[in-house]
Amino acid sequence: MSAELPDRPDPLTAPRRLAIIASRYNEELVDGLIEGAMTELSIIATGSDVEIVRVPGSFEIPFGVQTLMLRGEVDAVFAFGVIWEGQTRHADLIATAVTNSLLDLSLRFKVPVLHEVLVLQDEEQAIARCTPGAELNRGTEAARAAVRMLTMLDELRD
């Protein structure tokens, strides 16, 4: 894991249609990811429309992403969830299924999916990655990656 966020990219030149699919499970931590993304997007994706959709848990995130993509009205999707690593393999199974599904959806629909369904081991990791304004907030990181992907797509399409 990187110890710092990537630099802030240049802002988008036009507003985009963005969506966040967020787990209700571990809502306080997920809300920190949303806040990090929204704060950063207000700087680097000014005027963009951001729809927030809640699903029950991390396992349901890919279904929410797919449902949005089928509408064909989104330029990038953020997937935000928190999975606690436990003593069984359950967390690994969910994380693997979610990761594979999100990658498949991104490739199939040709829409960037910013995967921030985090598997966390302890509260220290959660605070570092999910607290609004934290140096490693993964919502902030996802916003920066989304803008870089959208810029890259614009350049390839020109």
Image: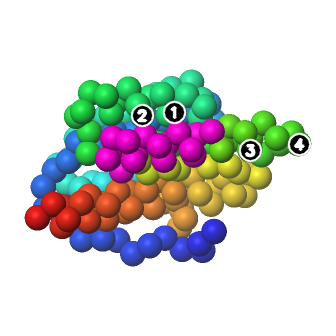
The percent coordinates of residue 28 (x first, y second) are 58, 38
Res 43 seen here: no
Along the line of sight, the residue nearer the viewer: 137 or 116: 116
- Nearer to us: label 4 or label 3: 3
SS for tag 1? helix
Magenta stretch secondary structure, dominant: helix
Q: Quadrant of residue 14?
A: bottom left
Q: Which residue is mark 1?
A: 61
Amino acid type, callout 4? Gln
Q: Which residue is mark 4?
A: 87
Find the distance from the CA under tag 1 to the CA under tag 4.
23 Å
Q: Which residue is mark 2?
A: 65
Looking at the image, residue 72 lies above or below residue 13: above
Q: Quadrant of residue 74?
A: top left
Q: Are marks 3 and 2 in contact (CB under 8 Å)?
A: no
Amino acid type, callout 3? Asp
Point 32% across, 47% down: residue: 110
Amino acid type, callout 2? Val
First in residue order: circle 4 vs circle 3: 4
The percent coordinates of residue 101 (x first, y second) are 53, 39
Q: Are marks 2 and 1 in contact (CB under 8 Å)?
A: yes
SS for tag 3? helix
Along the line of sight, the residue nearer the viewer: 140 or 103: 103
10 Å crowding of disc 4: few (<14), some (14-19), many (20+): few
Point 23% across, 42% down: residue: 17
First in residue order: circle 1 vs circle 4: 1
Q: Which residue is mark 3?
A: 92
- Nearer to us: label 2 or label 4: 2
SS for tag 2? helix
Does the stretch in magenta take in 100?
A: yes
Which residue reaches farthest front?
108
